[in-house]
Image (cartoon, helix red, strand yellow):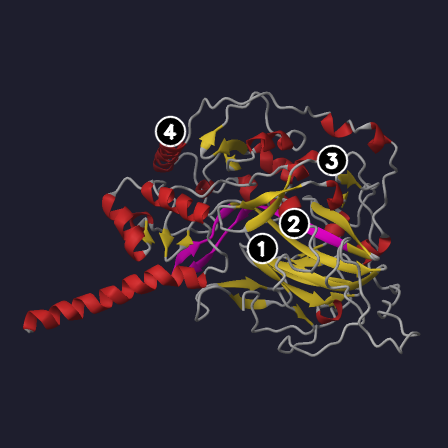
């Protein structure tokens, strides 16, 4: 009996740990894992050269425990004349070389790039007859302002500069390119459409190269005497009746009026007051911009006509690095390349709602719910992750007890309307493809034939276009378990795969959110989360 009690005392806690480790990642993960994703996970676990590491990963979800270490946002300065530091850099380079030898084949054949740098300037005859359209003034008048975090270390990045530091990998194998990849030939990589194509950092990101931080793109001080209009705060569930279905529409599903038919003389929506003299004037790209809130890193503006007078204005923000948040001193969710976005939906030139992206989801709000400076919505970008929120403060997600949280504050104010690539997108020109399941388990609808569905706006007629059709990822693929930089605890990775580009953020969606289950809030809910 004595030994039986001792065996029970040991085995019961162990069984609980195994049960929690097995099912906790499934419960906390908001995405669905398909069979392909599970097969990739098995290969990832098998990449570890250590037997006990593989068993611990399979049975109790503790992967790469011998890799655990601090991952600071900024490294201390290195003195060039310090021999120990020089030795450390040599060892770092050796480690990178070993990783490439194990994970990549350096002589993978690659056909010549099919498009030269002049390809964007050559359109078919039908395209030449088109007149480039101006970005509507109401889109600029209601463009968002982004509060970056005051302690941010990874600032907005220029996609041109980002890809200069990248090589291309296909399923962890390095391509031997004959021409350097650029915004003008990136689409040529789509010939590997059934494989994982990624832009891979030439340098080890843990050495924190300068381009990763993008300090030169820190917005200039925004000196605006006008105070913000605080948003109404509640539980997000304020009852509200809409006059029509502006919140769920596309060209195949036009707006339907749902208000009382007896109120024929009542407009479907309240017009927005004309901007006063105190509102900042937007200077279109191509002219010398006002320096307040200006960043050298251009944002990307994509305008999508959904029919019935509905225009969606997608503002995309790119960062070269996503620094994950910490749990008990350990960092999770790092990845190279980071696309965030917000979308403003207009009905006949009047803003009706706005969407903020947050990690693998996001939150939609009615226009009157969010904070504004004049007529412009204010967004708060979280430190490291750059997730977008409607309020400053702490924003817990995924893990209970606020163990994992984003943090926002009123740091430097970025005005993306002062510097951007602007495009119009007609999704009806695309041919649908089978659903694609990405590394993170998110299923997206692929688009195949690129029949000039993107056209540059008149403000930037020579802006590169074909990069928008690139189907691969903008940062390193998830490092293998054999890589000393990688670990995974209870389903949460230290490093994950970089994101896909703007075209694959469901631009053709009917609702404000990519996920149809997301709620439209009429008040800010400080305690709410997009996955609840």
Q: Marks 4/2: CA distance?
A: 34 Å
Characterize the local packing of mark 3: few (<14), some (14-19) or many (20 or more) Cα atoms within 10 angstroms. Answer: few
Q: Tell which circle, 3 or 4, labels the residue nearer the N-terminal end.
A: 4
Query: Which is nearer the eye, 155 or 346?
Result: 346
Q: Earlier in the sequence, mark 1 or mark 4?
A: 4
| Viewer-nearest residue: 223 or 434 | 434
Neighbour tally class for label 1: few under 14, some 14-19, many 20 plus, Cα within 10 Å? many
Residue 224 part of the magenta segment? no
Q: Which residue is mark 2?
A: 317
* Residue at point 82%, 47% (across, down): 284
Report, in whole angstroms, how far the alpha carbon at label 1 lies from the one at label 4: 33 Å
Count of marks, rendered view: 4
Q: Residue at x 78, y 39 (%)?
A: 455
Work out whether residue 327 can be spotted: no
The residue segment tinted magenta is 312-335
Residue 419, x across and y down, in percent: 74, 46
Question: Label 3: which residue?
Answer: 451
Q: Position of residue 327 (x, y in %)?
A: 41, 61
Quarter residue 350 falls in? bottom right
Q: What separation in Å lies between label 3 and label 1 (alpha carbons)?
A: 33 Å
Q: Which mark is residue 101?
A: 4
Query: 106 above or below 11?
Result: above
């Amino acid at each position: 009996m004595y030994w039986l009690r001792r065996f029970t005392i040991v085995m019961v806690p162990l069984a609980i740990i195994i049960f929690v480790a097995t099912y906790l990642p499934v419960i906390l993960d908001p995405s669905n894992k398909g069979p392909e994703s599970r097969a990739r996970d098995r290969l990832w676990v098998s990449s570890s050269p250590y037997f006990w590491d593989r068993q611990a990963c399979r049975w109790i979800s503790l992967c790469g425990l011998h890799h655990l270490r601090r991952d600071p946002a900024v490294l201390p300065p290195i003195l060039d004349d310090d021999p120990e530091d020089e030795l450390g850099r040599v060892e770092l380079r050796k480690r990178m070389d070993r990783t490439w030898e194990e994970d990549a084949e350096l002589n993978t054949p690659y056909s010549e790039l099919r498009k030269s740098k002049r390809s964007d300037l050559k359109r078919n005859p039908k395209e030449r007859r088109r007149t480039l359209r101006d970005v509507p003034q109401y889109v600029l008048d209601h463009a968002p302002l982004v509060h970056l975090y005051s302690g941010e270390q990874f600032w907005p990045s220029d996609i041109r500069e980002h890809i200069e530091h990248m090589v291309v990998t296909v399923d962890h194998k390095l391509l031997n390119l004959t021409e350097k990849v650029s915004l003008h030939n990136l689409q040529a990589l789509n010939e590997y459409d059934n494989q994982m194509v990624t832009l891979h950092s030439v340098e080890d990101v843990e050495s924190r190269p300068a381009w990763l931080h993008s300090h030169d793109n820190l917005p200039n001080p925004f000196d605006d005497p006008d105070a913000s209009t605080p948003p109404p705060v509640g539980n997000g569930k304020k009852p509200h009746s809409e006059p029509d279905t502006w919140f769920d529409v596309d060209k195949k599903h036009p707006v339907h009026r749902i208000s009382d038919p007896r109120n024929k003389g009542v407009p479907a929506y309240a017009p927005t007051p004309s901007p006063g003299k105190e509102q900042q004037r937007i200077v279109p790209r191509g002219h010398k911009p006002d320096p307040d809130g200006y960043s050298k890193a251009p944002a990307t503006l994509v305008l999508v006509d959904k029919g019935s007078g509905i225009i969606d204005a997608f503002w995309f923000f790119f960062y070269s690095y996503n620094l994950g948040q910490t749990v008990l001193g350990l960092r999770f969710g790092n990845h190279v390349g980071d696309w965030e976005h917000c979308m403003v939906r207009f009905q006949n030139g009047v803003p009706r709602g706005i969407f903020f992206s947050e990690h693998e989801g996001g939150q939609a709000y009615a226009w009157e719910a969010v904070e504004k400076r004049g007529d412009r919505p204010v967004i708060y970008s979280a430190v490291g992750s750059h997730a977008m929120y409607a309020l400053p403060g702490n924003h817990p997600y995924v893990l209970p007890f606020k163990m994992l949280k984003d943090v926002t504050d009123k740091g430097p104010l970025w005005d993306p309307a002062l510097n951007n690539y602007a495009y119009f997108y007609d999704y009806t020109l695309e041919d649908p493809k089978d659903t694609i399941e990405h590394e993170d388990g998110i299923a997206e609808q692929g688009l195949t034939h690129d029949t000039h569905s993107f056209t540059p706006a008149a403000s930037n007629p020579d802006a590169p276009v074909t990069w928008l059709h690139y189907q691969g990822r903008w940062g390193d693929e998830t490092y293998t378990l054999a890589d000393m930089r990688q670990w995974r605890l209870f389903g949460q990775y230290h490093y994950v795969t970089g994101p896909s580009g703007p075209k694959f953020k469901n631009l053709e969606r009917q609702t404000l959110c990519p996920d149809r289950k997301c709620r439209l809030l009429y008040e800010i809910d400080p305690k709410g989360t997009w996955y609840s």
